[in-house]
Image (cartoon, rainbow, N blue to C red):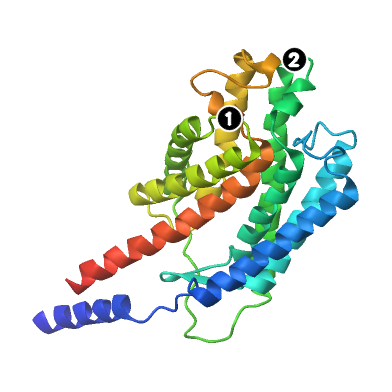
Amino acid sequence: MRTRMESDAMAMKEFFSREIPNTLDWAGRFRLGCGVVICYALFWQTSRWAAIPPLRGMNVSLLSMPSAAMGIGIVAAAVILGTLAGRLIVGDLLIATDVQIEGGLVAALLGMSALCVRGGPLRFVLFQSDDHPSVFLMLAGELVLLFVITGIAWWLLIKFESLFAHSDENQTPHAEPDAISTGLMATGTHALVMAACMVFLAASDDTQQTLAAALISALLASMAAHVAFPVRSPIWFWISPMFVGVVGYWIAYFNPTGLPIGFPQGPLGGLARAAPLDYAGIGAAGAIMGFWIAHRWHIEQAQQAAAA
């Protein structure tokens, strides 16, 4: 009995102490950086060619543009193309013991920030609303639509991944599916933490500040949520910014105090100062990157516990 327990302990120790390739070293970061640069250039040139927005710095909402359907279609094509191109450049990322395929998606989402830079702050969209609070419902609908596009890109990424499956029997397996209840609790925790951070960080609707607020809030929220619910797939985290933004726009719809001056007010006004492109782009990317960091920390703690 003692021999059996010792062998099991030795096998577990060998499993957790085995060498894990760090694909986020200088080479992995270089590949990821190249993917981000290429996707940023893709979105920048596409937006210039398609005049998204028609007046640079004056409209960051796709649905409020004259040709909203064409704008949504062009952005959707750019997201999908950028995700697949980023997949070829970045490749798989081995985070702790799980292979992550979202490197290309992160590159595309970070590249989407080019649209935010060209669009400008959200106040100009609110100025065009004739002081009607329904503009916040339009922004909420646009945010949901952008996350649907991101979900399609993620689904295509999974299908695209099957084309690059390796026949090596010793290949590190991909992440096992998480329990739905655990995933939903992780998403709820992430949304609460991200919303709390956005309230303080989104002090204005300046483009640089809202981008930084969405990135930092989603990043910290992933770390906090992963401590309580150590899920193995980042999807439970990158969908959270959608709920944060929708709730923020919905609250602003019922409390449009600052609408005439283009500045949502109230205790939760910071949630409505970021544009849908902020939440769907750099916010979702920050959530995935925060998951990578927290997941690696979690495995390192398990390794230390096994070694002890």
User: Where is mark 1, residue-wise?
Assistant: 204
Task: Name the residue that disc number 2 marks.
Answer: 132
Q: Is residue 49 left or right of residue 253?
A: right
Front-lying residue, 71 or 117:
117
Q: Pick the quarter of the image with the C terminus.
A: bottom left
Instruction: Judge whether residue 1 can be spotted in this image.
Output: no
The x and y percentages for residue 159 are 68, 66
The reply to whether residue 281 is visible in this rendering is yes
Residue drawn at (58%, 86%) of the image = 167
Q: Quadrant of residue 89?
A: bottom right
Of callouts 2 and 1, which one flags the residue occurring earlier in the amino acid sequence? 2
Q: Say if mark 2 contacts mark 1, CB within 8 Å.
A: no
Residue 128 vs 62, above or below: the answer is above
Residue beneath the point at 81% across and 31% down: 64
Give the answer, above or below, for where 142 lies relative to 248.
below
Rendered residue at 69%/76% (across/down)? 163
Q: Categorize mark 2 by other alpha carbons within 10 Å: few (<14), some (14-19), many (20+).
A: some
Inter-mark Cα distance, 2 to 1: 21 Å
